[in-house]
Amino acid sequence: MKHRGYYGEFGGCYVPEILTSTIEQLDEAFCAARSDPAFWAEYVRIMGEYSCRPTPLTYAENLTRHFGGARIYIKREDLNHTGAHKANNVMGQGLLVRRMGKKRVIAETGAGQHGVATATMAARCGFSCTIYMGALDVMRQRPNVFWMERLGARVVAVNEGSRILKDAINEALRDWVTNMDDTHYVLGTACGPHPFPEMVAWFQSIIGREAREQIQRLTGSLPKRIYACVGGGSNACGIFLPFIDDDVELVGVEAGGRGVATGQHASRLSAPGAAVGVAQGYKTFFLQDGDGQMRETHSVAAGLDYVGVSPILADLHRQGRVRFESATDTEVVQALELTMRAEGLIPALESSHAFVQAFKEAPRMSPDESIIINQSGRGDKDIFTVADAFQDPAWRDFITDTARRYANA
Ligand SMILES: *Cc1c(COP(=O)(O)O)cnc(C)c1O
């Protein structure tokens, strides 16, 4: 257990003694599943029937013409059930839970997307489901809380600490320690203690495996560069890792928020300011202040607003194998608008970070070269934020009018 689960100096498994045997059991189940070709085949079959796999690789003809450089292809993870790549991870873990014979799942969620994905999986697999969410997030993310509850999950509002994601993670771990025998913790990204980073990245690698085959079929060769946004790092690991031994440049794009100079961002690898530390069960770069306290992060995209980052990506950063950039909130909204107008696609604000960097680089590349942008999710969920960013007056009337009707009812 000591040497596995490290990526250079990053990763590891820093959990309370009491969880060791549960984590070991999970690791064994994962290793057995991974070496059983029937397990992956079953996973691919279910993702085809229940979600939308293989997701298409769309040639963005109009954006390509607009920039006049590299040919732009978009991997369409937005077409998954519940609207993002998160479906890949939760369904994979669901199959593993079934194999382990457990009957209950728990998860942490910040913006609520992972909570909704987990609740759909639990409903489909017949598991009981509890979702931990900071009390502030429960208030801010009412639409997702609504869906989780309708899907049969119990949503627990966590009133500890700052009442946000990190407090929800602590509470979920506390639950797991108490109920290990029948409960699995469905971690939402390629972070946390081993074997979670490896396991989540493995399920998400379905993205890159498909994209590799698709781009070769469409263009006869591999892409020059691949762009993915980076929150915890699961969609980036998913599309990058199947290309890791190829001559393909990999670019991860973090949340630049109001600009990295303002301190209001979530750029851990693309800007100075993060330091290596151990928290939440693993070792990586965390945004922390001088005393080692976790810093507040900011992004227009709730899914990128996280203090840590996958240990797999931290190591690829240190090796120089993946290049990290950041995109500001303003750039992100502009790239989203251009993509909507040019292609009729509505990328999530998270995904739009990858589009920003691709749009900066594509014009300087040759039409013989192709690039892939991972559209990790769809933007419908972002209507509140995007309508505000465009200062849409009719939207504002709609909200105030709805509020007035409720107040009078
Ligand atoms: C959650 C989310 C992300 C960030 O998570 P990663 O683990 O970094 O992939 C990115 N895009 C979308 C659409 C998301 O919902």
Image: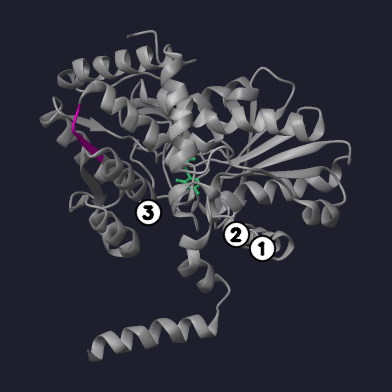
Magenta segment boundaries in residue numbering: 102-106
Q: Few, some or many C-alpha atoms within 10 Å of disc 2 (few <14, some 14-19, many ≥20)? A: many
Q: Nearer the viewer, mark 3 or mark 2?
A: 2
Residue type at tag 1 = Met
Question: Which residue extends farthest bottom?
Answer: 408
Q: Position of residue 305 (x, y in %)?
A: 44, 49
Q: CA distance from mark 2 to mark 1?
A: 6 Å
Query: Is residue 193 visible to us here?
Result: yes
Q: Quadrant of residue 348?
A: bottom right
Residue 51 lies within the magenta run = no
The circle drawn on residue 346 is: 2
The circle drawn on residue 340 is: 1
Q: Nearer the viewer, residue 61 or 305?
A: 61
Dominant secondary structure, magenta: strand
> In the rendered view, does 220 fall on the left or right side of 408?
right
Q: Position of residue 101 (x, y in %)?
A: 21, 24
Q: Position of residue 261 (x, y in %)?
A: 57, 51
